[in-house]
Amino acid sequence: MNTNKKTARMKDRRVLLSTLWIFVMFNYLYADLVMMIVNPAIYERAATKMTGGVVLGFAALMEILIAMVLLSRILTYKANRWANIIGGIVGTAFVAVTLNARAPAFYLFFSSIEILSTLFIVWYAWTWRDPNNETPSLS
């Protein structure tokens, strides 16, 4: 395969990964917004129990996922691939931990979309082959 096609495929994969992170972030934000509107008491109870360190931890966790929008476009191939795999696993685990049997249907709906999206990111990054390697791509 010529170099131009390799470069184009790599750029396409970067753009799609970045776009997927934007999609995931909008789902996170909208699910939280709807929950705050529908059941503000949940957020009020949670906020009274959180220390500054816990809030900082959640902020750092979310910032990692937000940063993936940019990092997916600028990191080198190997760093990009591993950052997306790790970020996708972290995002999947974060949402999975927030699920419980009493969650409203809309929250389960959003969580399902978020989990499927982050698992797709993991798979898509996992199957991303080095454009400088002549091994056929699995995707």
Image: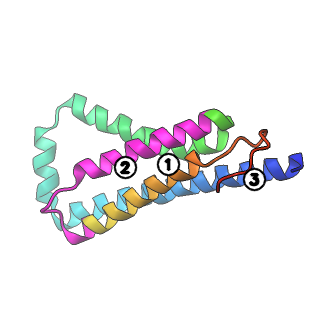
Is residue 81 found inside the magenta-colored segment of the image? yes
Q: Which residues are magenta?
A: 79-107
Would you say 63 lies left or right of 98 here?
right
At mark 1, the secondary structure is helix
* Crowd tier of the residue under label 2, counting other residues whose Cα lies within 10 Å: few below 14, some 14–19, many 20 or above: many
Whichever of callouts 2 and 3 sits on the residue coming sooner in the sequence is: 3
Name which residue lies at 37% across and 49% down.
Answer: 92
Numbered circle sitting on residue 92: 2
At mark 3, the secondary structure is helix
Where is residue 128? Give x, y as percent.
64, 47
Whichever of callouts 1 and 2 sits on the residue coming sooner in the sequence is: 2
At mark 2, the secondary structure is helix
Name which residue lies at 53% across and 37% down.
Answer: 83
Name which residue lies at 80% across and 47% down.
Answer: 7
Residue type of the residue flagged with mark 2: Thr
* Crowd tier of the residue under label 1, counting other residues whose Cα lies within 10 Å: few below 14, some 14–19, many 20 or above: many
Would you say 125 lies left or right of 59 here?
right
Identify whether 128 is placed above or below 101: above
Disc 2 to disc 3, C-alpha distance: 26 Å
Task: Name the residue at the front extreme.
Answer: 135
Name which residue lies at 57% across and 57% down.
Answer: 19
Identify whether 27 is placed above or below 4: below
Where is residue 26? Give x, y as percent.
43, 59
Q: Check contact, mark 1 vs mark 2: CB within 8 A.
A: yes
Numbered circle sitting on residue 26: none
**Residue 108 visible in this rendered orientation of the protein:** yes
